[in-house]
Image: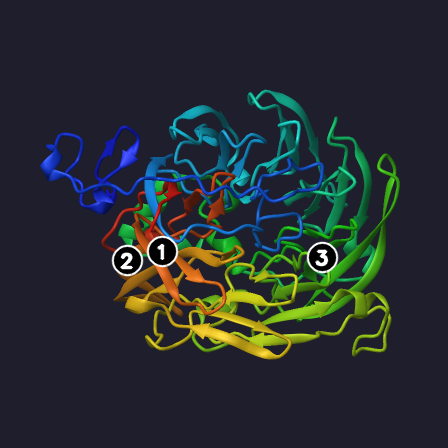
Amino acid sequence: MKMSRYSGLCGGVILSVFGGAGCGGSPSDVLPTPEPIELPCRPSQAAPYADGIPYLGVHGDAGNSDIIRCKTGSAFTPVWHALEGLGLTQPNTFSPDGSVTYATTTHPQKDGCRLHAVDTVTGQVRWCKSFAPSIGRSSVEVDSAGMLYFTVDASVVSLNASGQPRWTTSFESAVGGADAPWGMHFTPQGQVATVTSSGTVHLLSREDGTRLDSLNIQEVYGFVAPEAGVAVDISALFPTSIQENIKTVWGNYDKVEDGPAFANFLGQGDFVDNTLAIASNGDIYVIGGGPEQGKGALVQLRMSGSTEAPKLQRGWYAITHKGSATSPSISPGDRYVMISDGAAAENQTKSGIIDARVKVMDIPACDANTDADPDEDICAVAYEQKLERGAAPGSPAIDADGVVYFYEFGLSWGWSETDRDVVAFDASGVKWSHPLSEDRDWTSVVTVTDNHIIGTATRVQPSDEQLGAVVFPQTSDDALIVLDRMSGEEIFSAPVPDDSAATVTVAPDGALYVGMYGLISVLTLDEKPTLGLLRFSPTAR
């Protein structure tokens, strides 16, 4: 097994990162550990979310902005490592009082726990529940009453704070098969909103799961699903050591969709394969199929009606390049909505740079039809940036002023030390672009606070083995990393066992949580993934 860089726990505090000798060492053997401090991060949140909780669900909030409205620390110390051996595809979330964090994970055993309630002080698991592997596509969202909501298989599920069932609502497609939802968010009116693989948006009652309204995008807009992607498990083509890593994380699975999701990463041809975004007025944005197979679309759905009887209605749409790389992201205040496109199966397995872009639309201009496209049904791109390494693996962040923060990433590892890794741009162009030190690549979705950009970064030693454009790493080294928001300058880093695909989350007490998915660690020839959830507390510099 890959050795954790945290070799010992003493009183719940990890010492080895800072040179500690472990629990049995004498005081002279142990370097002083920085004293954790509390640096509150309690932004105002609208109902039905709990007020004062900074991180609400996948991409930070219902609009997927990845913006956390508080200042965060400039130095951190690791406190505990929970859920070791289990991978987190989506970010952890918090109870209304911040005492519990909820995480969905992988598990190699068929009936193993994949939903966990973890004590934020001790890192101990309070309770866990067994659900199907598809729960890993969903964060747990928590309302102000402490009730839990998430998606799994073809259902939205609600539990109480003790993990006991409240209700389950399941979906079928027009042809009668299971229709899997892609995560969920709460609307400002208090409903649960989700979108399924077929492109159907559903509004459900939080109280009992009753379906209040639905709209099928394919039918209403006349759109078609993307071309089918890779329909086989390509992990069978990987080197033997990597196949063993996959089994360590996911186990032996009967169906591709229950496994490591490499086929989903390469595109399965679902009409939708990303989480919807919800504006503060209740309007919903979905990225998926478009007017023809070579094109996708960002679709706006207007919300009207009452809380008890909401109504979804057709809005405008924006054309995207083939393949939906990211969920839509709405800026705080609802001025802009952003996507990144260009993801398609052949683009992940063949060499060469594809036409992938981060695109920003001006919502008020498109609503009033004063954007660049005279067709009132179509929203024109207001400004954009072309990606240099291929389609984005995670949604960028966008702030209220329309500044976008994105990262470049590719599995060929053929980038120069001076190539940009993290970029900030707006309508005027690139504000700054930053190459990370030590030849590292940014590997997680970005979290943007009032003063920092936070995520994980990885330095890879490439091997001589590859599959298409994917070069398998020989070894990798991973770190939690903090950048200055205004300049991109690196101000802090600390080693972590594995890379994170999901967002680094911010807790009400200012702690950072790193959920490790370990995609790069799994694909590394000479290492074994450690995985799990890490808590880092802020310290005085």
Q: Which residue is mark 3?
A: 333
Disc with the residue nearer the chain's start (1 vs 2): 2
In the rendered image, the residue lying farthest to the front is 540
Of residues 295 and 38, the one nearer the viewer is 38
Q: Name the element at disc 1.
A: helix
Of residues 170 and 480, the one nearer the viewer is 480
Q: Name the element at disc 3.
A: loop
Q: Which residue is mark 2?
A: 476
Disc with the residue nearer the chain's start (3 vs 1): 3
On the question of residue 122 being in view, the answer is yes
Question: What's the residue at 60%, 68% (across, down)?
Answer: 403
Of residues 421 and 296, the one nearer the viewer is 421
For the N terminus, give its image quadrant: top left
> Which amino acid, mark 1?
Ile
Question: What's the residue at 66%, 48% (across, down)?
Answer: 62
Dot 1 and dot 2 residues touching (CB under 8 Å)? yes
Q: Which residue is mark 1?
A: 520
Q: Nearer the viewer, mark 3 or mark 2?
A: 3
Q: Residues within 10 Å of mark 1 (few under 14, many from 20)?
A: many
Q: Position of residue 214 (x, y in %)?
A: 80, 44
